[in-house]
Image (cartoon, grey):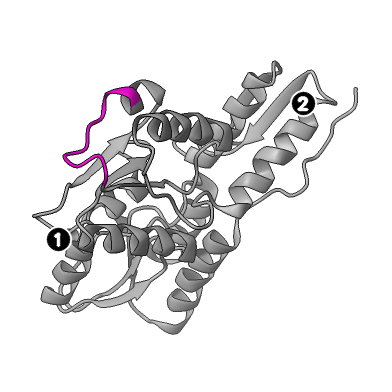
C-alpha cells in the first residue's frame, strides 16, 4: 500500500498568526487570556492552548471586565468590539487579513447602498461576523446564499445595485456555480477584484485533486466542524474518490 502526503498541508498563515498571538500573550501575561470562539477549528490546538491558560468563550459578556481578550481568526462584527470596549477589555484582534478584506468589501457596498449576497454557510462564525459589517439601514441589506438553489431564489430590492462576497473557506467549484447563477439573474452584479477564497484554501483543495489522481481513498485530518476540512472531503468525493474526515490517531 502506498500512502501519499499532500503538499501543501497544515494551517494557513492567518491561523498560524492567530495561534502565535495567543501563545505570546500567554507567555507575557500572568493572568488568563480569553479568546472569543475557538482560535481555529482544531481540537488539538485548542486543547493545547487551554492547557497553557487560554479560556475560550462564546460571547464577550462571559469575559471578566478589564481582562485580556483575543478575537479569533474568523473575525467578528463591529458590535463585538464595541461591547468589548464597554467592558474595558484589552482586545487583541487576530482576525485573518483575508477575512478583514471581505469585511472592507461589505462596508464599501453597504455605504453605496447595494444589496450584498454573502456566499457562505449561514451559521458559520466568519459569516456571522461579516454580516455585522453591513450597517446601512437604508441600503438593500446583506443576504446569505448557501447554494445554487438559494441563489435562484434570493432577491435584491434594486437589481442594478447588487454585489457579492464569499466566505473565505468555501470550495472553489461550489462558489463558481453559485456566482454563475447570480450573474445570470443580475448581470450588473459586482464581485471582488480578487477572489475572496483564501489562497491557502485553494492550494489545499488543488492538492486534494492531485491526490485523487493517485489514490483510492483520501483521508482529511481535521475537525468535524472545520469548514476547510469538510470542503476538502467534498472536493475528493466530487472527484469520484472515497474520502473520510478523521480527527486523531
Q: Main secondary structure of the magenta part?
A: loop
| Residue 15 numbered mark, or none | none
Near mark 1 (Cα within 10 A), the count class, few <14, some 14-19 or many ≥20, is: few
Q: Which quadrant does the N terminus fall into?
A: top right
**Helix, strand or loop for disc 2:** helix
Q: Position of residue 90 (x, y in %)?
A: 27, 79
Q: Are marks 1 and 2 in contact (CB under 8 Å)?
A: no
Residue found 61% across the figure and 33% down from its top: 232
Distance of label 1 from label 2 (alpha carbons): 46 Å
| Residue 61 numbered mark, or none | 1
Viewer-nearest residue: 72 or 231: 231
For residue 207, above or below residue 100: above
Going by the image, does 75 lie left or right of 141? right
Q: Which quadrant does the C terminus fall into?
A: top right
Q: Is residue 237 magenta?
A: no
Going by the image, does 6 lie left or right of 47? right
Q: Position of residue 226 (x, y in %)?
A: 48, 40
Viewer-nearest residue: 193 or 70: 193
**Helix, strand or loop for disc 1:** helix
Residue found 9% across the figure and 54% down from its top: 138
Q: Quadrant of residue 86?
A: bottom left
Q: Position of residue 132 (x, y in %)?
A: 22, 55
Foreground mark, 1 or 2, reads 2
For residue 36, above or below residue 91: above
Write down the residue under mark 2. Answer: 212
Segment tinted magenta in the rendering: 152-160
Q: Position of residue 116 (x, y in %)?
A: 28, 47
Q: Quadrant of residue 206?
A: top right
* First reached walking from the N terminus: tag 1 or tag 2: 1
Amino acid at each position: 500500500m502506498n500512502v501519499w502526503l499532500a503538499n501543501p498541508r497544515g494551517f494557513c498563515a492567518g491561523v498560524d498568526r492567530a495561534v502565535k498571538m495567543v501563545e505570546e500573550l500567554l507567555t507575557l501575561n500572568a493572568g488568563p487570556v480569553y479568546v472569543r470562539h475557538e482560535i481555529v477549528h482544531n481540537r488539538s490546538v485548542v486543547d493545547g492552548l487551554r492547557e497553557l491558560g487560554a479560556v475560550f468563550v462564546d460571547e464577550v459578556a462571559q469575559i471578566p471586565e478589564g481582562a485580556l481578550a483575543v478575537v479569533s481568526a474568523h473575525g467578528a462584527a463591529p458590535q463585538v468590539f464595541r461591547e468589548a470596549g464597554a467592558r474595558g477589555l484589552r482586545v487583541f484582534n487576530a482576525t485573518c487579513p483575508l477575512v478583514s478584506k471581505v469585511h472592507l468589501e461589505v462596508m464599501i457596498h453597504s455605504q453605496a447602498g447595494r444589496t450584498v449576497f454573502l456566499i457562505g454557510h449561514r451559521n458559520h462564525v466568519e459569516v456571522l461576523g461579516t454580516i455585522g459589517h453591513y450597517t446601512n439601514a437604508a441600503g438593500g441589506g446583506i443576504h446569505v446564499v448557501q447554494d445554487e438553489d438559494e441563489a435562484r431564489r434570493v432577491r435584491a430590492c434594486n437589481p442594478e445595485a447588487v454585489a457579492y462576497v464569499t466566505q473565505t473557506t468555501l470550495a472553489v467549484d461550489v462558489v463558481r456555480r453559485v456566482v454563475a447563477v447570480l450573474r445570470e439573474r443580475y448581470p450588473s452584479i459586482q464581485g471582488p477584484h480578487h477572489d475572496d477564497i483564501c489562497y491557502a484554501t485553494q492550494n489545499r483543495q488543488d492538492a486534494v485533486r492531485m491526490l485523487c489522481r493517485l489514490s483510492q481513498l483520501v483521508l482529511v485530518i481535521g475537525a468535524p466542524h472545520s469548514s476547510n476540512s469538510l470542503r476538502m472531503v467534498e472536493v475528493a468525493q466530487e472527484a469520484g474518490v472515497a474520502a473520510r474526515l478523521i480527527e486523531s490517531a
